[in-house]
């Protein structure tokens, strides 16, 4: 059900040192580094991200990504979110910078968190 989780950090370099250390014994490693966001995982698929805090005073936006079975399910997630009044952050599309088949949508939940539905299966 959960594809990946992302948290914001007040001091990203310090958090990166910490997560580099504590995830290594669990088999996790840094697998992507975009400067303001770092991804960890086992193998090539990132499932835990940390990023520089960019929202609010005290509030730290969470990011939750839910796995969708296919691209129509991502679209259905988007339609349901819009129908419920969610703010659209990014409409459904491919995100090739993450993976060639990464198809996702991003919306805000009622508490201001970034919630995503993603399908990693090739189209067709």
Image (cartoon, grey):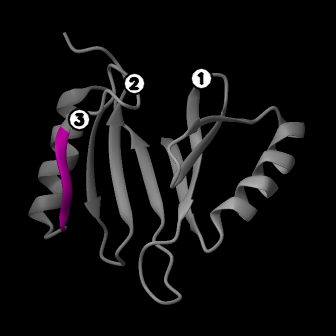
Nearest the camera: 32 or 84? Answer: 32
Mark 3 or 2, closer to the camera = 2
Q: Are marks 1 and 2 in contact (CB under 8 Å)?
A: no
Residue 12 versus residue 66: which sits nearer the camera? 12
Tell me if residue 56 comes above or below residue 32 in the rendering. below
* Residue at x 27% of width, y 52% of height: 106
In magenta, the rendered stretch is 87-92
Q: Is residue 85 left or right of residue 77?
A: left
| Secondary structure state at the residue bearing disc 1 | loop
Residue depth check, mark 3 versus mark 1: number of the one nearer the observer: 1
Q: Is residue 91 magenta?
A: yes
Q: Is residue 61 magenta?
A: no
> In this figure, which residue is indicated by the disc labeled 2?
99
Sequence-wise, the earlier of marks 1 and 2 is 1
Q: Position of residue 17 (x, y in %)?
A: 79, 54
- Per the image, label 3 sits on a secondary structure element best described as helix
Residue 12 place in picture, x, y as percent = 64, 63
Q: As drawn, is 33 to the left or to the right of 124?
A: right
Q: Which element is circle 2 on?
A: loop
Label annotation for residue 44: 1
Question: For the stretch drawn in magenta, what is the main secondary structure?
Answer: strand
Residue 82 is drawn in which quadrant? bottom left
Residue at the spot of label 3: 73
- Residue depicted at 43% across the width and 48% down the height: 65
Instruction: Report whether 104 appears left or right of 90.
Output: right
Q: Residue furthest right?
A: 25
Residue closest to the eye, 104 or 50: 50
């Amino acid at each position: 059900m959960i594809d990946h989780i992302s948290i914001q950090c007040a001091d990203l370099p310090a958090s990166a040192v910490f997560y580099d250390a504590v995830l290594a014994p669990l088999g996790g490693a840094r697998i992507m580094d975009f400067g303001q966001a770092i991804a960890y995982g086992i193998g090539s698929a990132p499932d835990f991200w940390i990023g520089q805090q960019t929202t609010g005073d005290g509030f730290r936006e969470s990011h939750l990504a839910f796995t969708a079975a296919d691209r129509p399910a991502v679209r259905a997630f988007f339609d349901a979110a819009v129908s419920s009044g969610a703010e659209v952050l990014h409409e459904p599309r491919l995100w090739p910078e993450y993976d060639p088949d990464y198809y996702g949508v991003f919306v805000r939940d009622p508490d201001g968190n970034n919630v995503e539905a993603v399908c990693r299966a090739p189209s067709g």
